Amino acid sequence: MGECNRDQYINENIVLPGIRKVQFDAETINSFTIANEVIAAADTEQSYSFPSGTKGFEIAARDKFAKLQISFTSGQSNSLFRTVPYGVTWGKTGLDSSTSFTVYFQSPKVGATIEIVSWS
């Protein structure tokens, strides 16, 4: 395998063994935000509003057996949703940073911690 330095990885999105492909240019990132949300009640929708200027995000469940049901419309995290199982991180990049948005989620595991990372 040829050598690869950090600059090549960032600028060319080179995939290294054991590292997933990252598709954003680090030079455009101004700040990161980390939020930890705790599931207060099983199968009950909660929400998280992203900071102004968000360009991308990732969301995952920290606790075992805490699958997530995610939606971008209030009231749909139990009917029209994306399932994110434990051990999987899901997110979106290339978002319009001039638009604010909220993610709605729920989990069957009370007390589970949901990790949300966003960048602007």
Image (tube, rainbow, N blue to C red):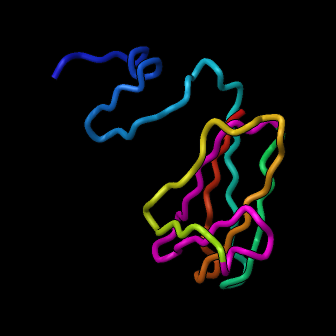
- Measured as percent of width and height from the top left, residue 32 is found at 67, 36
Residue at screen point 55% across, 59% down? 60
Give the dominant element type of the magenta stretch: helix, strand or loop: loop
Q: Is residue 63 magenta?
A: yes
- Measured as percent of width and height from the top left, residue 100 is found at 83, 46
- Asked if residue 110 is positioned above or below residue 54 in the image, the reply reads below
Q: Residue furthest front?
A: 80
Q: Of residues 118 and 23, which is closer to you in this image?
A: 23
- Measured as percent of width and height from the top left, residue 2 is found at 19, 17
Q: Which quarter of the rendered picture does the C terminus lie within?
A: top right
Q: Residue furthest left?
A: 1
Tell me where residue 9 sits by quadrant: top left
Residue at screen point 47% across, 77% down? 65
Q: Is residue 43 magenta?
A: no
Q: Taking 5 as reference, is 93 left or right?
A: right
Q: Which quarter of the rendered picture does the N terminus lie within?
A: top left
Q: Of residues 110 and 60, which is closer to you in this image?
A: 60
Residue at screen point 62% across, 63% down? 114
- Measured as percent of width and height from the top left, residue 37 is found at 70, 63
Residue at screen point 43% across, 14% down? 7
Query: What stretch of residues is rendered in magenta?
Result: 53-79
Q: How many marks?
A: 0
- Asked if residue 9 is positioned above or below residue 44 in the image, the reply reads above
- Asked if residue 38 is positioned above or below residue 29 in the image, the reply reads below
